Amino acid sequence: MREKYDGDAFDLQPEDLAGGWVPVFRAWFAEAVATGAPEPNAMVLATVDEAGMPATRTVLCKGLDERGVVFYTNYGSDKARAVDANPVAAVTFPWIAIHRQVHVRGAVTRVTAEETAAYWAERPRGSQLGAWASDQSRPVAGRAAMAERFAEVEARFEGADVPVPPEWGGYRIAPEVVEFWQGRENRVHNRVRLTAPDFRPVRLQP
Ligand SMILES: Cc1cc2nc3c(=O)[nH]c(=O)nc-3n(C[C@H](O)[C@H](O)[C@H](O)COP(=O)(O)O)c2cc1C
Protein backbone atom coordinates (compact mmCIF):
# COMPACT_ATOMS: atom_id res chain seq x y z
CA MET A 1 0.00 0.00 0.00
CA ARG A 2 1.42 3.32 -1.03
CA GLU A 3 -0.78 6.38 -0.91
CA LYS A 4 0.15 9.60 -2.76
CA TYR A 5 -0.18 12.79 -0.72
CA ASP A 6 -0.12 15.41 -3.45
CA GLY A 7 -3.77 16.12 -4.21
CA ASP A 8 -4.36 18.88 -1.66
CA ALA A 9 -4.52 22.48 -2.96
CA PHE A 10 -3.98 23.70 0.60
CA ASP A 11 -0.34 23.80 1.67
CA LEU A 12 0.12 24.42 5.40
CA GLN A 13 2.52 27.21 6.34
CA PRO A 14 3.57 28.33 9.84
CA GLU A 15 1.93 31.71 9.08
CA ASP A 16 -1.45 29.95 8.88
CA LEU A 17 -1.08 29.32 12.61
CA ALA A 18 -0.15 32.89 13.54
CA GLY A 19 -3.66 33.40 14.95
CA GLY A 20 -3.34 30.38 17.24
CA TRP A 21 -3.93 26.67 16.87
CA VAL A 22 -7.65 26.52 17.68
CA PRO A 23 -9.04 28.17 14.50
CA VAL A 24 -6.88 25.94 12.29
CA PHE A 25 -7.88 22.88 14.31
CA ARG A 26 -11.54 23.78 13.80
CA ALA A 27 -11.06 24.28 10.05
CA TRP A 28 -9.32 20.92 9.70
CA PHE A 29 -11.95 19.24 11.85
CA ALA A 30 -14.67 20.63 9.55
CA GLU A 31 -12.82 19.18 6.56
CA ALA A 32 -12.52 15.82 8.29
CA VAL A 33 -16.27 15.90 9.00
CA ALA A 34 -17.00 16.80 5.36
CA THR A 35 -15.27 13.62 4.12
CA GLY A 36 -18.00 11.60 5.82
CA ALA A 37 -15.38 9.39 7.47
CA PRO A 38 -16.78 8.03 10.75
CA GLU A 39 -16.12 9.67 14.12
CA PRO A 40 -13.81 12.55 13.17
CA ASN A 41 -13.71 13.51 16.87
CA ALA A 42 -12.08 10.17 17.70
CA MET A 43 -8.55 10.58 18.98
CA VAL A 44 -5.92 8.11 20.10
CA LEU A 45 -5.06 8.84 23.72
CA ALA A 46 -1.66 7.87 25.12
CA THR A 47 -0.96 7.68 28.83
CA VAL A 48 1.96 6.39 30.87
CA ASP A 49 1.30 4.40 34.03
CA GLU A 50 3.21 4.56 37.31
CA ALA A 51 5.63 1.87 36.10
CA GLY A 52 6.45 3.95 32.98
CA MET A 53 4.48 1.67 30.68
CA PRO A 54 2.70 3.52 27.85
CA ALA A 55 -0.78 2.60 26.65
CA THR A 56 -3.02 3.93 23.90
CA ARG A 57 -6.73 3.69 23.21
CA THR A 58 -9.31 5.66 21.25
CA VAL A 59 -11.59 8.15 23.01
CA LEU A 60 -13.95 10.84 21.73
CA CYS A 61 -13.08 14.51 21.98
CA LYS A 62 -16.01 16.24 23.66
CA GLY A 63 -14.61 19.74 23.97
CA LEU A 64 -11.76 21.76 22.56
CA ASP A 65 -10.65 25.34 23.05
CA GLU A 66 -7.51 27.26 24.07
CA ARG A 67 -7.64 25.55 27.49
CA GLY A 68 -7.22 22.16 25.87
CA VAL A 69 -8.85 18.93 24.78
CA VAL A 70 -11.59 17.25 26.83
CA PHE A 71 -12.66 13.62 26.97
CA TYR A 72 -14.93 11.69 29.32
CA THR A 73 -14.32 8.36 30.92
CA ASN A 74 -14.50 6.26 34.08
CA TYR A 75 -12.28 7.65 36.83
CA GLY A 76 -11.45 4.09 37.95
CA SER A 77 -10.38 2.89 34.48
CA ASP A 78 -6.81 1.97 33.60
CA LYS A 79 -6.33 5.25 31.69
CA ALA A 80 -7.62 7.23 34.69
CA ARG A 81 -5.31 5.36 37.06
CA ALA A 82 -2.40 6.11 34.76
CA VAL A 83 -3.33 9.78 34.54
CA ASP A 84 -3.80 10.03 38.30
CA ALA A 85 -0.32 8.56 38.86
CA ASN A 86 1.31 10.43 35.99
CA PRO A 87 -0.81 13.45 35.05
CA VAL A 88 0.25 13.90 31.43
CA ALA A 89 -1.24 12.61 28.20
CA ALA A 90 -0.99 12.87 24.43
CA VAL A 91 -3.70 12.62 21.80
CA THR A 92 -3.59 12.25 18.03
CA PHE A 93 -6.49 12.91 15.69
CA PRO A 94 -5.69 10.61 12.74
CA TRP A 95 -7.55 12.21 9.85
CA ILE A 96 -6.32 9.72 7.29
CA ALA A 97 -9.00 10.63 4.71
CA ILE A 98 -7.53 14.14 4.33
CA HIS A 99 -3.91 13.06 4.92
CA ARG A 100 -3.62 15.14 8.05
CA GLN A 101 -3.18 14.67 11.77
CA VAL A 102 -3.16 16.93 14.79
CA HIS A 103 -1.30 16.03 17.93
CA VAL A 104 -1.76 17.63 21.36
CA ARG A 105 0.08 16.80 24.55
CA GLY A 106 0.42 18.24 28.01
CA ALA A 107 -0.69 18.13 31.62
CA VAL A 108 -4.03 16.53 32.47
CA THR A 109 -6.56 17.68 35.05
CA ARG A 110 -10.12 16.64 35.82
CA VAL A 111 -12.78 19.02 34.53
CA THR A 112 -15.12 20.51 37.14
CA ALA A 113 -18.14 18.55 38.36
CA GLU A 114 -20.30 21.25 36.71
CA GLU A 115 -18.65 20.69 33.33
CA THR A 116 -19.10 16.93 33.65
CA ALA A 117 -22.76 17.40 34.67
CA ALA A 118 -23.43 19.61 31.64
CA TYR A 119 -22.03 17.01 29.25
CA TRP A 120 -23.72 14.12 31.14
CA ALA A 121 -27.10 15.79 30.59
CA GLU A 122 -26.56 15.64 26.80
CA ARG A 123 -25.88 11.89 26.80
CA PRO A 124 -28.63 9.46 25.79
CA ARG A 125 -30.18 7.62 28.74
CA GLY A 126 -28.82 4.29 27.49
CA SER A 127 -25.26 5.62 27.58
CA GLN A 128 -25.86 7.01 31.06
CA LEU A 129 -27.05 3.61 32.27
CA GLY A 130 -24.12 1.93 30.53
CA ALA A 131 -21.71 4.14 32.43
CA TRP A 132 -23.28 3.07 35.73
CA ALA A 133 -23.19 -0.60 34.69
CA SER A 134 -19.51 -0.65 33.76
CA ASP A 135 -16.65 -0.81 36.22
CA GLN A 136 -14.45 0.06 33.24
CA SER A 137 -11.24 -1.91 32.68
CA ARG A 138 -12.06 -4.50 35.38
CA PRO A 139 -12.67 -8.19 34.46
CA VAL A 140 -16.21 -9.56 34.10
CA ALA A 141 -17.46 -13.16 33.82
CA GLY A 142 -19.25 -12.66 30.48
CA ARG A 143 -21.79 -10.67 28.45
CA ALA A 144 -24.61 -12.15 30.52
CA ALA A 145 -23.07 -10.70 33.68
CA MET A 146 -22.84 -7.30 31.97
CA ALA A 147 -26.48 -7.55 30.85
CA GLU A 148 -27.43 -8.33 34.44
CA ARG A 149 -25.55 -5.26 35.70
CA PHE A 150 -27.27 -3.12 33.06
CA ALA A 151 -30.73 -4.48 34.03
CA GLU A 152 -29.95 -3.74 37.68
CA VAL A 153 -29.15 -0.07 37.06
CA GLU A 154 -32.10 0.24 34.67
CA ALA A 155 -34.39 -0.94 37.49
CA ARG A 156 -32.65 1.26 40.08
CA PHE A 157 -33.22 4.47 38.10
CA GLU A 158 -36.62 3.61 36.60
CA GLY A 159 -38.80 6.70 36.30
CA ALA A 160 -35.99 8.99 37.48
CA ASP A 161 -33.15 10.97 35.95
CA VAL A 162 -29.87 9.07 35.91
CA PRO A 163 -27.33 10.97 38.03
CA VAL A 164 -23.64 11.25 37.16
CA PRO A 165 -21.83 8.20 38.60
CA PRO A 166 -19.30 9.17 41.26
CA GLU A 167 -16.55 7.44 39.25
CA TRP A 168 -17.23 9.14 35.93
CA GLY A 169 -16.20 12.47 34.44
CA GLY A 170 -13.98 14.46 32.17
CA TYR A 171 -10.31 15.19 31.80
CA ARG A 172 -8.72 18.14 30.05
CA ILE A 173 -5.31 17.94 28.41
CA ALA A 174 -3.79 21.44 28.56
CA PRO A 175 -1.67 21.95 25.44
CA GLU A 176 2.07 22.07 26.06
CA VAL A 177 2.73 21.07 22.46
CA VAL A 178 0.36 21.11 19.48
CA GLU A 179 1.50 19.80 16.13
CA PHE A 180 -0.17 19.92 12.73
CA TRP A 181 0.90 17.45 10.08
CA GLN A 182 -0.13 17.44 6.44
CA GLY A 183 0.93 14.77 3.97
CA ARG A 184 2.69 16.17 0.88
CA GLU A 185 4.29 15.02 -2.34
CA ASN A 186 7.37 12.72 -2.15
CA ARG A 187 6.94 12.37 1.62
CA VAL A 188 8.17 15.95 2.08
CA HIS A 189 5.30 16.62 4.43
CA ASN A 190 4.33 19.80 6.26
CA ARG A 191 4.79 19.79 10.04
CA VAL A 192 4.19 22.83 12.19
CA ARG A 193 4.66 22.67 15.94
CA LEU A 194 3.50 25.21 18.53
CA THR A 195 4.86 25.04 22.06
CA ALA A 196 3.63 26.77 25.23
CA PRO A 197 3.73 29.41 26.51
CA ASP A 198 3.96 31.55 23.36
CA PHE A 199 2.76 28.93 20.82
CA ARG A 200 4.92 30.41 18.09
CA PRO A 201 4.51 28.18 15.02
CA VAL A 202 7.75 26.44 13.97
CA ARG A 203 8.16 24.27 10.88
CA LEU A 204 9.77 20.89 11.52
CA GLN A 205 11.40 18.56 9.03
CA PRO A 206 9.00 15.80 8.11
C1 LIG B 1 -14.27 5.10 18.40
C2 LIG B 1 -14.09 4.83 19.88
C3 LIG B 1 -14.46 5.79 20.78
C4 LIG B 1 -14.29 5.59 22.16
N1 LIG B 1 -14.61 6.59 23.01
C5 LIG B 1 -14.38 6.43 24.34
C6 LIG B 1 -14.58 7.52 25.24
O1 LIG B 1 -14.94 8.64 24.85
N2 LIG B 1 -14.36 7.29 26.55
C7 LIG B 1 -13.93 6.08 27.03
O2 LIG B 1 -13.76 5.93 28.24
N3 LIG B 1 -13.70 5.04 26.19
C8 LIG B 1 -13.91 5.19 24.86
N4 LIG B 1 -13.65 4.15 23.99
C9 LIG B 1 -13.13 2.88 24.55
C10 LIG B 1 -11.63 3.02 24.84
O3 LIG B 1 -10.90 2.92 23.63
C11 LIG B 1 -11.12 1.99 25.86
O4 LIG B 1 -11.36 0.68 25.42
C12 LIG B 1 -11.74 2.15 27.25
O5 LIG B 1 -11.87 3.52 27.59
C13 LIG B 1 -10.88 1.47 28.31
O6 LIG B 1 -9.57 1.96 28.26
P1 LIG B 1 -8.54 1.78 29.48
O7 LIG B 1 -8.74 0.39 30.00
O8 LIG B 1 -7.20 2.01 28.89
O9 LIG B 1 -8.89 2.81 30.53
C14 LIG B 1 -13.78 4.34 22.62
C15 LIG B 1 -13.40 3.37 21.69
C16 LIG B 1 -13.54 3.61 20.34
C17 LIG B 1 -13.09 2.57 19.35
Image (cartoon, rainbow, N blue to C red):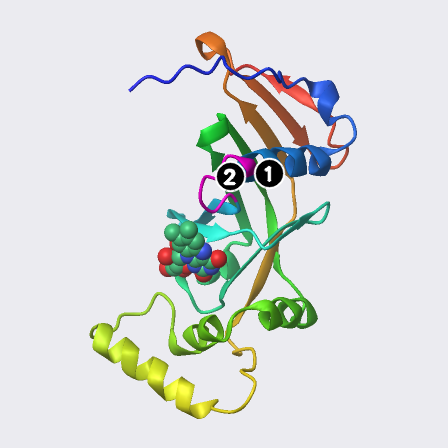
Give the quarter of the figure containing the N terminus: top left
**Which residue carries the number 2 mark?**
93
**Numbered mark located on residue 29 in the image:** 1
Query: What is the secondary structure assignment of the residue under circle 1?
Result: helix
Q: Quadrant of residue 150?
A: bottom left
Q: Quadrant of residue 141?
A: bottom left
Q: Which residues are magenta?
A: 34-40
Identify residue type, mark 1.
Answer: Phe
Name the chief secondary structure element in magenta: loop
Say whether mark 1 is within 8 Å of ligand 1.
no
State how far apart marks 1 and 2 are (Cα): 9 Å
Identify residue type, mark 2.
Answer: Phe
- CB atoms of marks 1 and 2 within 8 Å: yes
| The image quadrant in which ligand 1 is located | bottom left
How far across and down, in percent of the image, does residue 25 sit?
65, 36
Q: Residue furthest top?
A: 186
Residue drawn at 59 percent across, 38 percent down: 29
Looking at the image, is 183 positioned above or below residue 161? Answer: above
How far across and down, in percent of the image, does residue 178 sit?
62, 35
Mark 1 or mark 2: whose residue is earlier in sequence: 1
Q: Quadrant of residue 9?
A: top right
The verdict on residue 69 being magenta is no
Residue 79 seen: no
